């Protein structure tokens, strides 16, 4: 009968819809499974970055030495200052500083020899040179930015040149005597 025929057609249509929807869903899942890891790798979300920390073994960094590492894709300098460099930083009157900060404000109590800063010039973001490169440490014994000649002192405070601010001290903790965790 005509009504049976119509019912049969409707069933057929519904079944095809289901098959089409199922096919699309599977394709969707497959594509997402392939694409998501790529996206995560290329462009980590703010949440992932916000959680990322960097552990640094500082046991091999001798007094007077520095290493360059990275945290959240930015260079980080970890420098083991000698007593003379700490004394030099302490001798500078705060009034002489463009961005006044004591060395104590830039280090941890009892660990004043460990100077940890981002290796990002506060002028336009070049990577300054320092003890790690054994190169030009500038006029103030700290870091020197080769891009436009900013000089930072032994506490990585801006002393000369166009940079407006000291090298940034990132959040960090001493997880043990030999391990620093940044972030
Ligand atoms: Fe360092 Fe300009 S970027 S002085």
Image (cartoon, helix red, strand yellow):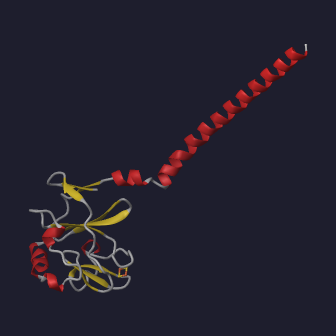
Q: Residue furthest top?
A: 1
Query: In this rendering, is residue 165 above or below 80?
Result: below
In the rendered image, the quadrant that contains the C terminus is: bottom left
Does any portion of residue 149 appear in the rendered image?
Answer: yes
Ligand 1: which quarter?
Answer: bottom left
Q: Quadrant of residue 135?
A: bottom left
Identified at 36% across, 59% down, the residue is: 72
Identified at 13% across, 82% down, the residue is: 92
Q: Residue furthest right?
A: 1
Identified at 27% across, 83% down, the residue is: 151
Q: Quadrant of residue 70?
A: bottom left
Image coordinates of residue 54 in percent, x first then y, are 30, 55
Q: Quadrant of residue 90?
A: bottom left
Image coordinates of residue 83 in percent, x first then y, are 9, 73
Q: Give left or right: position of 74 versus 29.
A: left
Image coordinates of residue 1 in percent, x first then y, are 91, 13
Image coordinates of residue 117 in percent, x first then y, are 26, 68
């Amino acid at each position: 009968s005509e009504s049976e025929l119509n019912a049969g057609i409707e069933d057929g249509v519904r079944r095809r819809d289901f098959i089409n929807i199922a096919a699309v869903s599977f394709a969707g899942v497959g594509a997402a499974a392939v694409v998501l890891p790529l996206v995560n790798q290329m462009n980590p979300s703010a949440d992932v970055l916000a959680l990322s920390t960097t552990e640094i073994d500082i046991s091999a960094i001798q007094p007077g030495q520095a290493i360059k590492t990275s945290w959240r894709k930015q260079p980080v300098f970890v420098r083991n200052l000698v007593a003379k460099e700490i004394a030099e930083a302490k001798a500078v009157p705060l009034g002489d500083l463009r961005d006044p900060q004591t060395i104590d404000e830039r280090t941890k109590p009892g660990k004043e020899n460990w100077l940890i800063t981002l290796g990002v010039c506060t002028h336009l973001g070049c990577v300054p040179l320092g003890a790690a490169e054994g190169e030009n440490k500038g006029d103030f014994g700290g870091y020197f930015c080769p891009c436009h000649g900013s000089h930072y002192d032994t506490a990585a405070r801006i002393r000369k040149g166009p940079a407006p601010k000291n090298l940034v001290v990132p959040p960090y903790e001493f997880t043990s005597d030999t391990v620093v965790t940044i972030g």
